[in-house]
Image (tube, helix red, strand yellow):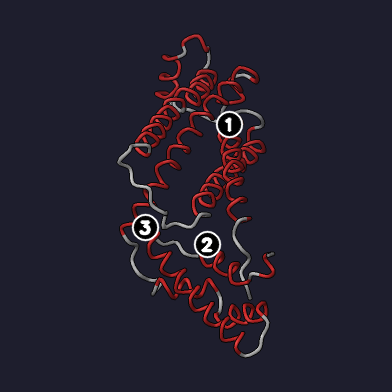
């Protein structure tokens, strides 16, 4: 039997994907919908329709799966339940950890840029930049061999792009590892998430994609202002953010591909 011959099964698949509910309410709603559809099919058969015609008519008369799912959940303006807040927290922890890891990786990219293109590419200031006397004294005290304030500032900025980001990445790895270990505990409950399957990959794709776009925009803007100087500071972060967004695009595409198309 093909999908075209089973409009009721297709409808129930679509309804299931539209139900961000706990397992027990989801089963109850699906069972209720299936009972109505089977009864409507039997009524169509009694009126002389073929089985496929009766099924299609039952689905058409039943209405949109998305509308039925919304109605079964009641008012859309209800405050989030404890289960929703719990699942949001569970989704936030790995995403925050991945964001921190991405920052750490960008520090590694900045270190590679320092080695390949030089400190000016990562830490250089725009042309005409001026530093206060106290700031210059601070930079020269840290880098006494730099000779000039501008060179000392460049060295400090290029090193900060690495030294300040790597520990952040290590913290992200620690959070992700702890979260993974807690999730594997024998006492950890396995429940169906109240969040749609597309929620987390969509949030990750949009968040990291926006960060990558902003950082890349700063690179482009800075290029017109100061040339190549300092371009690697933002470029290192922008590249990692865009790669992370692309990584989220893969599960997002799978989640969207698995969702039935909405019926008119």
Considering every residue shown, the one lying at the far bottom of the view is 47
Q: Position of residue 148 (x, y in %)?
A: 53, 16
* Residue placed under numbered mark 3 in the picture: 84
Q: Nearer the viewer, residue 121 or 236?
A: 236
What whole-number distance in Å separates the C-alpha atoms at marks 2 and 1?
A: 38 Å
Q: Are marks 2 and 1 in contact (CB under 8 Å)?
A: no
- Asked if residue 32 is positioned above or below residue 227 in the image, the reply reads below
- Per the model, the C-alpha gap separating discs 3 and 1 is 36 Å
Quarter residue 244 falls in: top right
Instruction: Using the image, determine if residue 171 lies above or below residue 7.
Output: above
Q: Earlier in the sequence, mark 3 or mark 1?
A: 3
Q: Give the side of residue 174 with respect to residue 204, left or right.
A: left
Residue at the spot of label 2:
17
> Pointer 1: what residue?
236
x and y, in percent, of residue 78 in the image: 35, 69
Identified at 65% across, 18% down, the residue is 116
**Foreground: 189 or 86?**
189
Location of residue 231 with respect to 64 vertically, above or below: above
199 horizontally vs 48: left or right? left
Residue at the (34%, 55%) spot, across then down = 85
């Amino acid at each position: 039997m093909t999908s075209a011959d089973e409009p009721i099964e297709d409808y129930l698949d679509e309804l299931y994907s539209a139900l961000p509910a706990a397992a027990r309410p989801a089963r109850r709603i699906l069972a209720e919908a299936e009972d109505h559809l089977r009864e409507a099919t039997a009524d169509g058969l009694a009126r002389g329709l073929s089985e496929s015609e009766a099924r299609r008519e039952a689905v058409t008369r039943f209405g949109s799966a998305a509308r039925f799912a919304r109605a079964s959940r009641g008012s859309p303006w209800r405050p989030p339940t404890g289960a929703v807040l719990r699942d949001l927290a569970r989704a936030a922890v790995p995403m925050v950890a991945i964001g921190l890891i991405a920052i750490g990786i960008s520090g590694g990219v900045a270190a590679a840029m320092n080695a390949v293109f030089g400190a000016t590419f990562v830490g250089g200031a725009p042309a005409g930049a001026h530093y206060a006397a106290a700031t210059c004294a601070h930079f020269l005290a840290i880098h006494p061999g730099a000779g000039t304030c501008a060179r000392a500032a460049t060295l400090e900025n290029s090193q900060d792009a690495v030294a300040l980001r790597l520990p952040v990445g290590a913290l992200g790895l620690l959070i992700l590892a702890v979260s993974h270990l807690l999730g594997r505990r024998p006492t950890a409950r396995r429940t169906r998430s109240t969040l749609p399957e597309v929620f987390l990959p969509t949030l990750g794709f949009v968040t990291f994609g926006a960060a990558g776009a902003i950082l890349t925009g700063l690179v482009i803007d800075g290029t017109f202002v100061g040339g190549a100087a300092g371009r690697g500071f933002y470029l290192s972060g922008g590249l990692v953010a865009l790669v992370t967004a692309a990584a989220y695009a893969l599960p997002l595409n799978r989640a969207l591909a698995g969702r039935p198309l909405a019926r008119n």
